[in-house]
Amino acid sequence: MHSNAFDKLLIANRGEIAVRIIRAARDLGIRTVAIYSEADRDALHTWLADEALCIGPPPAGKSYLNPDAIIAAAKQSGAQAIHPGYGFLAESAEFAKKCAEAGLIFVGPLAESIASMGDKALARRTAELAGVSTVPGTPQPIRDVEDARAWADEIGYPVMIKAAGGGGGRGIRVAQNRDELEQALPIAQYEAQAAFGNKAVYLEKFIPHARHVEVQILGDGRQCIHLFERECSIQRKRQKVVEEALSPCIDDEQRSQITLAAVRLANAVAYRGAGTLEFLVDPETKAFYFIEMNTRIQVEHPVTELVCGVDLVQEQIRVAAGASLRLRQEDVRPQGWAIECRINAENPSQNFMPHPGQVQRLRLPGGPWVRVDTALYEGYTIPPFYDSLIAKVIVWGETREEAIRRMRRALYELHIEGVSTTKSMLEQLFVNPCFASGQYHTNFLERWLDAEYRQA
C-alpha cells in the first residue's frame, strides 16, 4: 500500500455528490463519515455513511462552509482524509491548506494549484505560457475611446465591453463595429461605475453562437492524461442544464488539439487529482479558447465515466492517497455516447423559482444503460437552504441518436410528486430538432425558453 493510504474518509458535502463519494469509497474498502447540518438530519448521505456528525445549523455559512467545524469533525471521527465534492469548499485554497496543516489529506489538488488556477488572470497567463490560446482581449482596462478603437481593430469585431469589476454575466455590452463601440463605451463605463463602484472596462473578442466544451483531466502531480471532452452549451443563466460526452460540434482533429492543449496546461501546474479545463469553441473558425479551470470533480462527471469506463471519484481518492495514475493515455478509449440531464426542484412556469418541499411519491427510471445520481427518497423533505439540484439522469447509447431516445424514455419513467421539477421542460427540449441535430450554442436554451417553450 502507498505511503499516504487512509482507511477513513470524511465527505465535506451533502446531496447526490455526498452519496456518490460514499459509494466510491465503499467500493475501495474505505469507511466514510458524513457531516450534516440540522436541516439535513434525515438526508440520505447520513444513512449511507458508516457514521454521521452534525456540524451546525442550516445556513451553509454555519455548516458546510465552516472549515473549522469540518476539520474538527474529521479529528473527532478519526478520519484521515476529506473529500470536498463540488461547490461549498471544493475550490477553496484556504480550506485545502487548513486540511494539510491539520495533518489531513485533502482529496483534490494542492492548495497552490487551486490558488493559481482559481485566479482567472493568473490562469490566463499560465495558459498563454503553456501555448494554449485564450480569448483575445485587452490585458489592461481601456483608457479612452482612442485606446478602445485601436484594441478593437486589433482584436477584430464584434467585441464585448466588459466591466472589470463585474461578474456573473453582468456589465457586458457588445459592439459590432466602430460606431457602436464609440457609443457603447461611455454607457458601459457609467453602468460599471453604478453597478460595481468601478468604471474600468476592458475589451474581449465576442464569439457569436459559441460552444462551451470542457476537457476532463486526471493527474498525479507528475503526469496528466485526458478523458476526452464534454459538451456543456445547454445553459440557463450560465448554469449548465444538459451535458454530453462526447461533443457533437468537435471533429477528430479538433478533439486531438483541444485535449492535447488541456493536458499541456494541466502538466504546466503539475496537477494532481481530477480537474476540468473549460473552453469556448468558435463554430465558424473552429478555433478554441481556454476560459478557466475547475479544480474539482464536476457535476457532469458521470457522462465521462460512462463513455470512458473510469470511476473518476475512485481515481481522485487513489491519487490523493499517494498512488500514481493507473491509466496511460492510450488506455482511455471512448465508446458510444452519454447524456446527462440535471433535474432541479424548480418551477419553469414561474421563472424557475426554487420549489423545496416533501417528495410524496418517487419513481426513478431504470433499465439498461440508465443511471440516476440522487439523494431523494419517498418522504424526504427537500430543504430550502441549498442548491435546487435534486437528481441527475444519465444515459449511455452506442450512438448519440440512441442516447437521445434512451433519455426520452428515462424522463418519461421519472415521476416525482410533491415538488415542481424541470422534467417537463427537459422532455420538450429532447424533441427539439435543433437539439436533436446537435446545432445549438450557449444562448440556445434561453432563446428557446423565451420564444417557444410552454409549460405542459
Image (cartoon, helix red, strand yellow):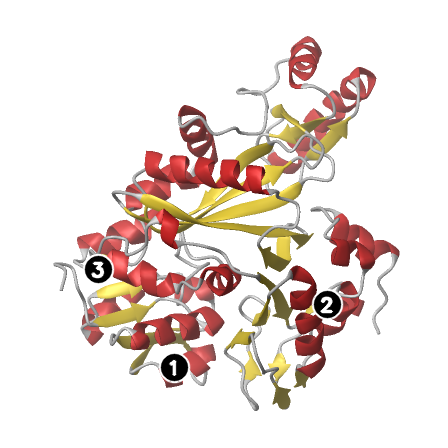
The tag earlier along the polypeptide, 1 or 2, is 1
Q: Is residue 140 left or right of residue 41?
A: right
On screen, residue 399 above or below 356: above
Which percent across, then down, holds residue 223?
A: 29, 43
Asked if residue 134 can be seen in this view, the reply is yes
Residue that carries the numbered disc 1 in the rendered image: 46
The tag earlier along the polypeptide, 1 or 3, is 1
Residue neighbourhood size for the residue with mark 1, other residues' Cα within 10 Å, grouped as few (<14), some (14–19), many (≥20):
many
Which percent across, then down, holds residue 214?
A: 53, 47
Residue that carries the numbered disc 3 in the rendered image: 321
Q: Nearer the viewer, residue 291 or 265?
A: 265
The secondary element bearing badge 3 is classed as: loop
Q: Is residue 236 left or right of residue 231?
A: right
Q: Amino acid under label 1? A: Thr
Q: Is residue 152 left or right of residue 385?
A: right
Number of the front mark, 1 or 2: 2
Residue 201 sits in quarter: top right
Q: Amino acid under label 2? A: Leu
Q: Nearer the viewer, residue 202 or 436?
A: 436
**How far is the residue under mark 2 from the one under mark 3?**
39 Å
